[in-house]
Image (cartoon, rainbow, N blue to C red):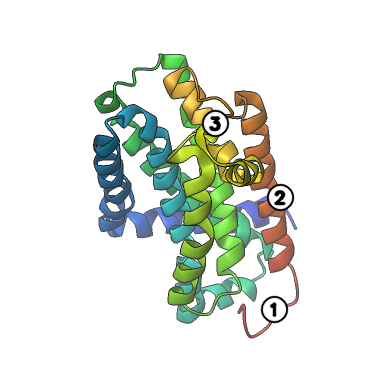
Amino acid sequence: MTPAGFFLPVAAIVARELIRFWREKARVAGFVGSPLIFWLVIGSGFGNLKFFFAGALTLTVMFSAVFSTMSLIEDRREGFLLSMLVSPAPRTAVVYGKVLGAATLAWFQGLIFLAFAPLAGIKPSLLALVQTAGVVYVISFAFTALGFLLAWRMESTQGYHAIVNLLLFPLWMVSGALFPASSAHTWIRAVMAVNPLTYALAPLRWLLEGTAPEGTPGLGVSVVVTAACGLLLWLASAALVARKPTSSNA
């Protein structure tokens, strides 16, 4: 298999994701608008828009990345996924193309939400903004890889939606987005310490706010953990797709 034989189908899938997104502009309003309203309501209620901004940004990226991979289930129903699996292109091209395309879309929507930072009194330096954009992409990639791994075996969008809400939203709530670890009960602090979303949120706090509540993981450690989780999920997705096709995933 030549490099062109691998990267050409990857580029085609990425382009398909971008075109699909462009034709469904309501997705931007939904994935950005919901966390924006959530941030304004919760932040205003507690009188601290700045504290809740990083959590809302993470929620925006999480929603966009995870639910963008829900289209994998639709691709299976429409026959597009089967055509990709039986084509001469390597099966892993489906993973790389889908994850890269959906991660780029989630990153783009995260940047849109990031533009509201001045409303929270957050005015980071240009370097911090560039670093934040890089961290947002790492987070987008990790969530997209997780979404792909979950969607590959799902048969319905309703079931996928239920699993995602049951798994991710509670983890987001105990990631430090709503309250710092220093004010949590002992067992909640233990959950926060092993929660991957805690490490996805932490670098955004350090970069945007210049500081973080007590008990927040360090910037470097958080980026490494998030990137490692994304890589492992990506490799797990590739390994799953590389298996012999069955009726449940083709």
- Write the residue at 24% across / 43% down: 41
Vertical order, 192 against 161 (above or below): above
Q: Which mark is residue 232?
A: 2
Residue 69 percent across, percent down from the top left: 49, 61
What amino acid type is highlighted by mark number 2? Answer: Leu
Instruction: Judge from the rendering whether residue 243 lies leftward or rightward of residue 21; answer left or right.
Output: right
Instruction: Judge from the rendering whether residue 248 lies leftward or rightward of residue 24; answer left or right.
Output: right
C-alpha span from label 2 to label 1: 22 Å
- Work out whether mark 2 precedes mark 1 in sequence or the reverse, and give the earlier one: 2
- Work out whether mark 3 precedes mark 1 in sequence or the reverse, and give the earlier one: 3
Q: Which mark is residue 245?
A: 1
- Write the residue at 63% across / 73% down: 85
Residue 52 lies in what quarter of the image? Answer: top left
Closest to the camera, between mark 2 and mark 1, is: 2
Q: Are marks 3 and 1 in contact (CB under 8 Å)?
A: no
- Label 2 sits on a secondary structure element that is helix
Vertical order, 202 against 240 (above or below): above
Residue farthest along the bottom direction in this orientation? 247
Residue 240 percent across, percent down from the top left: 71, 66
Residue 115 lies in what quarter of the image? Answer: top left
Residue underneath mark 3: 182
- Label 1 sits on a secondary structure element that is loop
